[in-house]
């Protein structure tokens, strides 16, 4: 096991590069199920979740190599059409093998994903969509068993623009006979990247980047290569690291256009933001102004930056409120931040934060990926030493975040521990 030891108080300065997007890669990899051949994914981030998805696909029969940020996939037909519980319980995104496996083999057996650190995460929209395409879906002993003689195009309307359901449905529909319409589709950049990759493979998808996707079923697809888009959540996390330490940082190899909601809020909080084609520069003034945030689906403020924003607001000049409209109970980081001296109370799906003079270092525990990031951010500015335990949560979605923060001047070390 590892923990981070952080000595707070350094104003972050300098430049750091962002890695490829976890939530794009986790859709690109299962898309390789759809067609035999060889694939290369460049700018792939070295993450535990990437390794988990690779292990699942290898278990299904693919041969995969991952080195120097390139993932090479060889698919000469699956031998296993299942995603066992031991894979799915580790990573919910394993559910992404359902759509492509059903699409190509007209059969898939995938473990129901459990909850996650912050509560249930239903998949009803995924299942209703594949049923509309003609699949017969049964739940047996915790497994989804989906079968179909043929899949036929259908009109699918999501009452929630679910990222996962949009990705799964797109992949289930590419071979369906006729036209599939997905209305109220998710338009997160990662969904757009996955849709664009499917088109590279020969799929016929129009309306990409809009809430209305039209998929014309085709008879065959072929392998292709892709470069993973930059991770907007990592970029946002690093920007907030610069902000919370009132430093001056430049985040490069990112997509500023994917960060509009955050950049607006940082400007409102008193930071000066400069953007170029592939960089964002943040400069600090002497104050952090309190700014309320409500998370929304893209292009609104992302729920995946909610915890990090709360960290920033713990030392703002006044009170603020952060409401999560996507996950109503995603606040496991709050009690840990309060242990660092923050003053936060949670009412329903809103955190009410009263800015304090300073945070004080303490030992805190990670509970989930973005909560852990918020604790690291708080540790960067807390007086004294902060120890963040269970940082395997962080390694799921951030590639060597301590090296990136060190490059910006943070005093942070990854040390072995038998503390759990
Ligand atoms: C994706 O999860 C991301 N994961 C999450 O990032 C992210 O927080 C989330 O989208 C929202 O942006 C990946 O892309 C791998 P949803 P997903 O389906 O697809 C409800 C991270 O930190 N819903 O868009 O599971 C659901 O409960 C992770 O990188 C249903 O009700 O999210 C939630 O309230 C965490 N029924 C809302 O929709 C369904 O069938 C949005 O969920 C599916 C979802």
Image: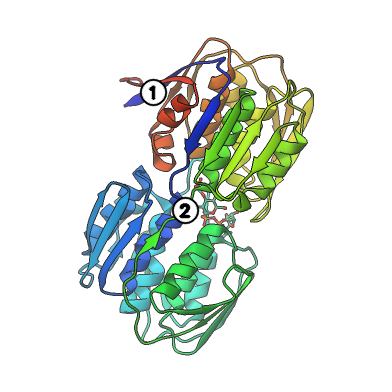
User: SS of the residue at dot 2?
Assistant: helix
Q: Which mark is residue 419?
A: none
User: What residue appears at the point 51 percent right and 33 percent down from the top-left corner?
Assistant: 15
Q: Is residue 140 visible?
A: no
Check the image and report above or below for 182 versus 317. Answer: below
User: What residue appears at the point 55 percent right and 58 percent down from the top-left corner?
Assistant: 189
Within 10 Å of disc 2 (Cα), the crowding (few <14, some 14-19, many 20+) is many
From the viewer's perspective, is the residue at label 2 or at label 1 nearer? 2
User: SS of the residue at dot 1?
Assistant: strand
Give the labeled residue for mark 1. 3
Where does the image place residue 375, in percent across and percent down from the top left? 53, 27
Give the camera-side residue of 149 and 45: 45
Where does the image place residue 67, in percent across and percent down from the top left? 26, 48
Where does the image place residue 392, in percent across and percent down from the top left? 38, 34
Give the labeled residue for mark 2. 23
- Spatial CA distance of label 2 from label 1 is 25 Å
Quarter holding ligand 1? bottom right
Q: Is residue 362 left or right of residue 142?
A: right
Count every numbered label the image shows and give the total.
2
Assess mark 2: CB under 8 A from ligand 1? Answer: yes
Give the camera-side residue of 412 and 43: 43
């Amino acid at each position: 096991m590892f923990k981070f030891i952080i000595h707070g108080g350094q104003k972050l300065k300098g430049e750091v590069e962002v890695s490829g997007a976890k939530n794009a890669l986790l859709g690109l990899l299962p898309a390789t199920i759809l067609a035999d051949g060889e694939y290369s994914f460049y700018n792939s981030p070295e993450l535990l979740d990437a390794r988990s998805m690779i292990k699942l696909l290898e278990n299904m029969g693919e041969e995969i190599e991952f080195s120097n940020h390139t993932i090479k996939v060889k698919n000469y037909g699956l031998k296993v059409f299942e995603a066992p519980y031991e894979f799915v319980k580790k990573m919910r995104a394993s559910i992404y093998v359902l759509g492509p496996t059903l699409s190509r083999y007209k059969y898939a057996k995938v473990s129901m994903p459990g909850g996650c650190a912050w509560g249930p995460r239903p998949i009803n929209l995924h299942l209703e969509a594949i049923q509309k395409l003609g699949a017969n879906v049964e739940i047996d002993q915790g497994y989804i068993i989906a079968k179909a003689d043929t899949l036929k195009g259908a009109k699918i309307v999501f009452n929630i623009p679910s990222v996962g359901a949009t990705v799964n449905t797109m992949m289930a529909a590419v071979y369906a006979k006729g036209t599939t319409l997905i209305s109220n589709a998710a338009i997160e950049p990662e969904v757009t990247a996955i849709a664009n990759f499917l088109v590279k493979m020969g799929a016929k998808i129009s309306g990409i980047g809009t809430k209305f996707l039209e998929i014309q079923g085709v008879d065959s697809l072929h392998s292709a290569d892709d470069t993973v888009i930059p991770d907007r959540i990592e970029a946002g996390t690093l920007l907030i690291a610069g902000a919370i330490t009132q430093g001056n940082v430049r985040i490069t190899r990112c997509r500023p256009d994917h960060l509009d909601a955050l950049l607006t809020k940082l400007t409102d909080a008193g930071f000066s933001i400069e953007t170029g084609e592939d960089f964002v520069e943040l400069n600090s003034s002497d104050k952090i102004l309190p700014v309320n945030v409500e998370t929304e689906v893209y292009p609104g403020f992302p729920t995946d930056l909610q915890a990090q924003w709360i960290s920033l607001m713990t030392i703002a000049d006044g009170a603020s409120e952060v409401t999560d409209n996507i996950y109503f109970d995603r606040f496991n980081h709050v009690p840990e931040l309060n242990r660092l001296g923050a003053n936060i109370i949670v009412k329903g799906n809103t955190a009410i934060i009263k800015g304090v003079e300073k945070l004080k270092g303490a030992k805190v525990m990670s509970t989930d990926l973005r909560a852990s990031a918020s604790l690291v951010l708080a540790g960067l500015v807390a007086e004294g030493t902060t120890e963040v335990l269970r940082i395997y949560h962080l390694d799921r979605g951030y590639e060597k975040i301590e090296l990136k923060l060190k490059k910006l001047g943070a005093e942070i070390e990854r040390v072995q521990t038998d503390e759990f």
